[in-house]
Amino acid sequence: MNERQYAAAGVDLVSADQAKARIAVLVAGTRTDLSVGQVGAFGGMVRVPPGLRRPVLVLSTDGVGTKVLVALEAGRFDTVGEDLVNHSVNDILVHGATPVAFMDYVAGAGLTVQQIAGIVEGVARGCRQHEMALAGGETAQMPGLYQPGNFDLAGTIIGVVEEDQALHGDGIRPGDVLLGYQSTGLHTNGYTLARRIIFQQQQLQVGDRLGDTGQTVAEALLAVHRSYLSAVMPVISRIHGLAHITGGGIAGNLVRVLPAGVGAAVEARSWHWPPLFRFIQEAGGVSLEEMRDVFNLGVGLIAVLPQDAVAVAEAAARAAGVPTWVMGAIRPGTRGVRFIE
């Protein structure tokens, strides 16, 4: 099949080469002292940071779900790339890991050079903010598998932590405090239900005002997933466990870090849901139980730490511009999470 036939089939090699050239510039701008090899090579290479006694690599792969459909509707492509990086940083942060390198995967059909560059610019921006190399990735045009103009986005992160300093939650004990860290909105979960309520049931458009949020639909739904690295890492040695609140909500994620013999008691009235979540619940007639199962409800991260570490953790978060509040405690008993009304 020659190039003209390939283009007729839906893959434009000329545009693909132009996108690669734009991406190469973005990738080069994220290189760190740990970067090895050339931009555009078949594999990305980074050194393990020096000075570690027994380094453990922490890896995670994730995506941003149907938030990409909101980005398509709004015609804005850079924020979901940054979402992807921040989400991934948080996923390894809960183990105490420092991010070292990232790789992205963009798959779609009929994407323009500007759209692809916008997505990768968001990824590169997130990497630069974390002093992490965008070591490589893949952009795949797959007409037939994707509808024209649609795309999906995923990424893999590599971090590193000393083996004896890695967090697993096994240090959590009765009397520890639950410290909640504020989210910036839905982050990257619950968008299928949120989109159904906002776009289908309420018939709102991306430029419409969204309830009492003080934002348009696009502004509220495309708010960038917050990274908690700068808020948490200064006090990581004082923390017994961390839970990134993603799909499954507070209970579904906090339970993942609890050891046997303890449970988490979450004080439901210790914080107020942001207006976005109240709008979704009221406009969609969603039960309290389902809201808790699907959304973060304004809590993006929960640290489990001893009482005498709370003040210093709050101060570190405040310095990073992240609001926090005490939202419960660890108690002896059956492993699980319950809400105290």
Image: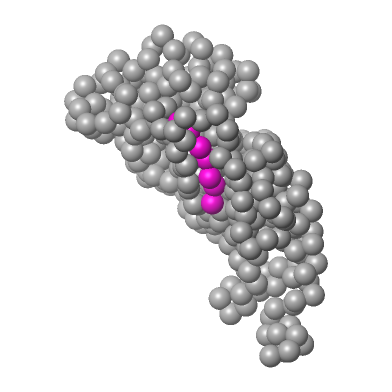
97 relative to 9, above or below: above
Q: Quadrant of the C terminus?
A: top left
- Number of callouts in the render? 0
Residue 159, given in percent of the width and then of the height, sits at: 52, 40
Q: How is the image coloured?
A: one colour
Q: In which quarter of the image is the N terminus?
A: bottom right
39 relative to 235, above or below: below
Q: Which of 5 and 299 is in front in this view?
A: 5
What's the residue at 39%, 36% (across, down)? 250
Asked if residue 96 is among those painted magenta in the image, a careful observer would answer no
Secondary structure mostly seen in the magenta stretch: strand
Q: Is residue 258 visible?
A: yes
Residue 256, given in percent of the width and then of the height, sits at: 33, 38
Q: Nearer the viewer, residue 324 or 202?
A: 324
272 relative to 153, above or below: above
Q: Quadrant of residue 172?
A: top left
Asked if residue 157 is among those painted magenta in the image, a careful observer would answer yes
Residue 262, given in percent of the width and then of the height, sits at: 24, 26
What's the residue at 62%, 77% (across, down)? 143
What's the residue at 74%, 70% (across, down)? 16
Q: Is residue 271 visible?
A: no
Q: In which quarter of the image is residue 260?
A: top left
Residue 238, given in percent of the width and then of the height, sits at: 44, 18
What's the residue at 63%, 63% (across, down)? 42
305 relative to 73, above or below: above
Q: What stretch is highlighted in magenta?
A: 156-162
Q: Which of 274 and 327 is in front in this view?
A: 327
Q: Which of 56 and 314 is in front in this view?
A: 56
